[in-house]
Image (cartoon, rainbow, N blue to C red):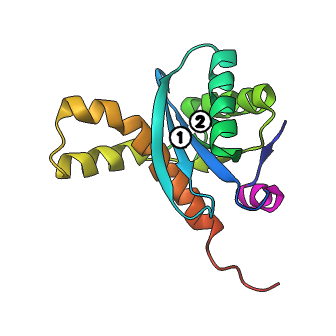
């Protein structure tokens, strides 16, 4: 399965289908879920990054359980917007997950999502130990919310 442009992906989705946001790190994959109206993202959890087949099975289980029809995967572009090694690795993983799950996938720029989430948790006086367990899912939620906001922007009439 190929990767979709975000707006093209949205046009293929069934009504009331949720989206799963994934923030694939080197050790942990943060998971977020949209509401059925695709307006609000919430942290869902995290899983250890292991074998692709195991990750795909977990993602498919979540999709079935929660009524999700597509994946939005974080793309860690370089600060200048270029595709560096981390972004290329995320793209390769996104292609592989799309192939393994059969779910449509779009990618979303996630520059600084973990930093923004860490900053917010620090400002909320969350301890370092508690932040460690929450940042991955929260970063996935932050990234997914950005995608939802883009999808819900008013479009000029063509």
Residue at (34, 44) in percent of width and height: 115
**Residue 70 rendering spot, x and y as whole percentages:** 72, 45
- What secondary structure is found at the residue carrying circle 2? helix
- What secondary structure is found at the residue carrying circle 1? loop
Q: Which residue is mark 1?
A: 76
**Residue 134 rendering spot, x and y as whole percentages:** 34, 37
Reply above or below: 89 against 9: above
Q: Is 132 displayed left or right of 33 in the figure?
A: left
Residue at (65, 79) in percent of width and height: 154
Residues shaded magenta: 6-13
Q: Examine the image and state in which quarter residue 37 appears.
A: bottom right
- Residue farthest along the top direction in this orientation: 51
Q: Which residue is mark 2?
A: 87
Query: Label 1 near label 2: C-beta < 8 Å?
Result: yes
**Residue 107 rendering spot, x and y as whole percentages:** 65, 46
Q: Is 27 displayed left or right of 132 in the figure?
A: right
């Amino acid at each position: 399965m190929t990767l979709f442009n975000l707006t093209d992906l949205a046009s293929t989705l069934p009504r009331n289908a949720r989206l799963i946001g994934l923030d694939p790190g080197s050790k942990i994959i943060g998971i977020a879920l949209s509401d059925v109206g695709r307006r609000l993202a919430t942290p869902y959890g995290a899983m250890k990054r292991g074998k692709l087949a195991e990750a795909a099975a977990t993602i498919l289980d979540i999709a079935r359980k929660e009524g999700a029809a597509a994946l939005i995967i974080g793309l860690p572009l370089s600060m200048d917007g270029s595709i560096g090694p981390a972004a290329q690795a995320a793209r390769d993983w996104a292609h592989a997950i799309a192939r393994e799950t059969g779910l449509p996938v779009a990618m979303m720029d996630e520059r600084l999502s973990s930093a923004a989430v860490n900053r917010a948790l620090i400002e909320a006086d969350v301890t370092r130990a508690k932040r460690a367990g929450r940042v991955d899912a929260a970063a996935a939620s932050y990234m997914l919310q950005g995608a939802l906001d883009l999808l819900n922007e008013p479009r000029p009439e063509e």
